[in-house]
């Protein structure tokens, strides 16, 4: 729970109070976590306050004892200039993100200081996943810098970073263009192309990304914890770097391959709930007219993979039916097998009765219609994890579905080869549902299965997975 004034004048120092309280509705619910009966547990609280001056530390620890509210932390803030400022407070235990709450403060000249309401967000669980490391990436729009912070067993200080040549978006698009060409080459050759050369090219792109897009201090911190890392979560700015393509390599360190090749790499968007159990009692498929020729083959194959324990929710071809399903809060799996047009102006799926794009999810996102059942959304389409900037906010399929309350989201970063896309989905569902593997490990196994199909096909690196790496799926409607 956080308390901050809602109005003040430039240059005036104001306090921000933060506390973790027991299960009352006056705060944000944290994830449940075990508390040592005698010594209690430590929770790290971080602050993100762009445009404001933080007097003192950006992070402090709270000591949580059994059956008690925590003490109150005090942060000191000052606004140097007028404007509307947002402050985000996040809680971590180990490398596991527990939850966040946001406050807003209006700063105007000659304004009186006025208290604001208590802001709260639930932390449903204080459980942490041993071995999980979170890389928190935040952008300071005014300064044009990025702040990287690696959070694991040790809580490392933030590193401010200027990308060489400015915004890395242009370099990322160049990489995507080459990956698209590689996927097309693999499809044309039927798996008989120059695989080793293409693999080497991808590896060099990954090494260059690691060298130029990750601060050296963070690289050192990563290697210090590498042997203890079981899952790698990226929280924050996603489109600046294709994180799945990172290839950690430094002199004197073991070459272990692409990061997503040897560790579960998952993403989180700000405001996304942490979901540890995903219900998959049924599955619905989205296959609009004009979908790839083998889309129906994909549906047939996936129905067999999911098995009789997952009820068949049918195939959706019309926008009206799809929107009604989402706004009604579906339970289970929503799988898209279709084309996704992506340009600088946004993403779009052409349904039988008109276009369906991320703005059509605004109502569901605002009311959190998916929060009751926490469905899994799998968008097996071109660049479905890509985002656009819309009125200063990141708008794309992943953040919209997750803000609406989806338990997890899987999408692609560039066009993928059909055969490889089907293999990834089949293996992913088989591992997640039939074999009970957690989300992160199921994605790694699916990557390996596709990687081994054809050495030069980059499809296995194209998938972005959003959610908790330790989340598991169940087919029982009651979640038992």
Image: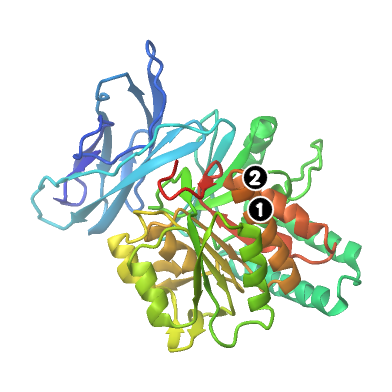
Crowding at label 2, few (<14), some or many (≥20) Cα neighbours within 10 Å? few
Return the residue nearer the eye: 32 or 16. Answer: 32
Asked whether the viewer can see residue 438, the reply is yes
- Image coordinates of residue 478 in percent, x first then y, are 40, 46
Q: Is residue 408 above or below residue 63?
A: below
> Quick one: SS at disc 1?
helix
What residue is pinned by disc 2?
435
Q: Say which label, 2 or 1, has the lower sequence index.
A: 1
Q: State the image coordinates of residue 55 (x, y, percent, origin top left).
A: 31, 37
Query: Label 2 to label 1, Cα distance in Å?
Result: 6 Å
Tell me the colour scheme of the image. Answer: rainbow
Q: Left or right: 367 with respect to 142?
A: left
Count of labels shown?
Answer: 2
Location of residue 412 (image quadrant): bottom right
Tell me: residue 234, above or below residue 360: above
Task: Give me the disc on residue 321.
Answer: none
Residue lying farthest top? 38
The N terminus lies in which quarter of the figure? top left
Q: Identify the secondary structure beneath mark 2.
A: loop
**Left or right: 424, with 319 as reference point:** right
Q: Which mark is residue 430?
A: 1
Q: Position of residue 75 (x, y in %)?
A: 28, 35
* Residue at x 20%, y 43% (from the top left corner): 4
Q: Quadrant of residue 224?
A: top right
Left-right relation of 165 to 450: left
Q: Nearer the viewer, residue 337 or 332?
A: 332
Q: Name which quarter of the figure residue 42 lies in.
A: top left
Residue 417 visible to the viewer = no
Q: Are marks 2 and 1 in contact (CB under 8 Å)?
A: yes
Q: Report x, y in % for residue 298.
A: 66, 71
């Amino acid at each position: 729970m956080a308390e901050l004034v809602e109005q003040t004048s430039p240059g005036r120092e104001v306090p921000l109070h933060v506390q973790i309280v027991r299960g009352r509705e006056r705060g944000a619910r944290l994830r449940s976590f075990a508390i040592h009966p005698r010594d209690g547990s430590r929770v790290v609280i971080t602050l993100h306050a762009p445009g404001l001056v933080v007097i003192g530390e950006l992070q402090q620890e709270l000591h949580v004892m059994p059956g008690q509210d925590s003490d109150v932390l005090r942060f000191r803030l000052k606004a140097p200039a007028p404007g509307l400022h947002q402050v985000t407070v996040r809680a971590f235990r180990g490398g596991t993100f527990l939850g966040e709450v946001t406050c807003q403060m209006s700063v105007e000249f000659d304004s009186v200081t006025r208290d604001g309401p208590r802001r709260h967000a639930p932390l449903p669980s204080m459980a942490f996943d041993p071995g999980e490391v979170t890389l928190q990436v935040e952008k300071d729009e005014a300064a044009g810098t990025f702040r990287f912070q690696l959070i694991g067993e040790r809580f490392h200080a933030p590193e401010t970073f200027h990308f060489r040549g400015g915004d890395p978006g242009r370099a990322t698009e160049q990489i995507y263009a080459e990956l698209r060409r590689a996927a097309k080459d693999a499809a044309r050759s039927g798996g008989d192309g120059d695989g080793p050369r293409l693999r080497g090219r991808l590896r060099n792109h990954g090494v260059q990304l690691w060298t130029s897009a990750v601060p050296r201090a963070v690289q050192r911190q990563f290697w210090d914890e590498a042997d203890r890392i079981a899952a790698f979560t990226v929280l924050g700015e996603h489109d600046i770097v294709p994180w799945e393509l990172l290839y950690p390599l430094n002199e004197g360190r073991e070459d272990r391959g692409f990061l997503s090749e040897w560790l579960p790499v998952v993403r989180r968007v700000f405001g996304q709930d942490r979901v540890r159990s995903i219900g998959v009692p049924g599955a619905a498929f989205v296959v609009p007219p004009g979908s790839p020729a083998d889309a129906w083959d994909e549906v047939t194959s996936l129905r067999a993979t999911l098995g009789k324990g997952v009820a068949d929710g049918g195939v959706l071809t019309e926008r009206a039916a799809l929107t009604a399903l989402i706004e009604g809060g579906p339970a289970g799996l929503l799988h898209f097998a279709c084309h996704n047009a992506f340009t600088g102006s946004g993403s779009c799926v052409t349904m039988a009765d008109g276009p369906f794009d991320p703005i059509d999810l605004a109502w569901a996102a605002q009311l959190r219609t998916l929060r009751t059942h926490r469905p899994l959304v799998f968008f097996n389409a071109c660049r479905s994890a890509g985002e656009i900037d819309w009125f200063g906010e990141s708008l794309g399929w992943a953040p919209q579905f997750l803000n609406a309350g989806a338990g997890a989201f899987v999408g692609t970063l560039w066009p993928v080869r059909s055969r490889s896309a089907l293999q990834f989905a089949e293996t992913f569902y088989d591992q997640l549902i039939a074999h009970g593997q957690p989300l992160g490990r199921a994605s790694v196994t699916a990557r390996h299965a596709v990687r081994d199909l054809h050495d030069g096909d980059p499809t296995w690196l194209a998938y972005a997975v959003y959610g908790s790496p330790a989340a598991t799926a169940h087919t029982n409607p009651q979640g038992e």
